[in-house]
């Protein structure tokens, strides 16, 4: 584990922290990957949590969007109490999300984080194309990086809210019919990341649509 000093820390949403830290020498990761992270405090050395890099590998800093949960009194709660100059500890890099071609990114809540880095990378290389993002949340105030994705993707940014009816967004859950509406062709890739219940439901929809597993890139959290 290596200590990384916090350069900035602020609220992204009501329960998500936007954190930037120093970048250790020699750290290598691909857009979509994550690392084991904890707070640099006694008794937390072995309390590792997986956080996805939302920075680009070429950035001179590391960046994370870290969701806090009211019923979790551990690492994420402690991170919410940190300030500039405090440190986190970072360990091994891992993750299966990797861009494999144009498609539909389907995320639930904090499952958006690997796609932030991937889409930033595509944007930097002028390769956004017709990629689409379907993002499921409870309410509009839960949408991470809403302004960024709205500007980047326009009509290809589809929000689905389960606990709020909003004139701009769809209400309910991600359905087979919604996915089918946005499928481009038989080569469309599907990138999935979210809580297990959502992942199970979406994988079921894709199976019913006859989508071969070779076209699915997924990571649960």
Image: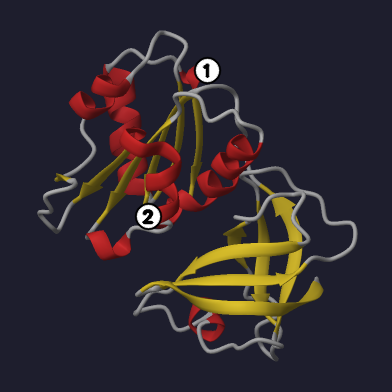
In this rendering, the answer to whether 19 lies above or below 44 is above
Q: Which residue is mark 2?
A: 146
Out of 219 and 136, give the one closest to the viewer: 136
Percent of width and height locating residue 98? 62, 34
- The residues tagged by marks 1 and 2 sit, at their Cα atoms, a distance apart of 30 Å
Secondary structure under tag 2 reads helix
Image check: 177 left or right of 210? left
Can you name the residue that lies furthest to the right here?
26
The number of callouts visible is 2
Q: Is residue 189 above or below residue 199?
A: above
Is residue 51 placed above or below 200 in the rendered structure? below
Point 27% across, 65% down: residue: 141
Looking at marks 1 and 2 on the same chain, the residue that comes earlier in the sequence is marked by 2
- Kindly check if marks 1 and 2 are in contact, taking CB atoms under 8 A apart as contact: no
| Whole-percent x, y for residue 67 in the image | 45, 68
Residue 124, numbered circle:
none
Q: In the rendered view, does 150 fall on the left or right side of 167?
A: right
Judge left or right: residue 153 versus residue 56.
left
Image quadrant of residue 100?
Answer: top right
Judge whether residue 221 can be spotted in this image.
no
On the image, the x and y values in percent for residue 126 come to 61, 31
- Furthest residue toward top: 186
Q: Quadrant of residue 158?
A: top left
Neighbour tally class for label 2: few under 14, some 14-19, many 20 plus, Cα within 10 Å: some
Q: Which residue is mark 1?
A: 214
């Amino acid at each position: 584990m290596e200590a990384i000093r916090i350069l900035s820390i602020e609220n992204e949403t009501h329960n998500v922290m936007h954190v930037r830290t120093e970048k250790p020498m020699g750290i290598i990761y691909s857009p979509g990957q994550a690392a084991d992270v904890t707070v640099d405090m006694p008794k937390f050395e072995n309390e590792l949590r997986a956080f996805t890099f939302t920075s680009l590998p070429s950035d001179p800093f590391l960046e994370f969007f870290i969701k806090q949960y009211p019923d979790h009194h551990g690492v994420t709660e402690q991170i919410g109490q940190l300030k500039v100059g405090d440190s986190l500890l970072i360990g091994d890099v891992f993750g299966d999300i990797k861009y494999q071609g144009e498609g539909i990114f389907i995320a639930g809540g904090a499952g958006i984080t690997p796609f932030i880095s991937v889409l930033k990378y595509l944007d930097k290389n002028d390769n956004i194309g017709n990629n689409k993002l379907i993002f499921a949340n409870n309410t509009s105030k839960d949408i991470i990086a809403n302004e960024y994705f709205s500007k980047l993707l326009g009509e290809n940014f589809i929000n689905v809210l389960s606990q709020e009816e909003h004139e701009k967004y769809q209400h309910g859950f991600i359905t087979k019919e919604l996915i089918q509406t946005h499928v481009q062709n038989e080569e469309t890739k599907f990138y999935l990341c979210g809580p297990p219940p959502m992942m199970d439901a979406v994988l079921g929809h894709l199976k019913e649509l006859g989508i071969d597993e070779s076209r699915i890139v997924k990571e649960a959290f």
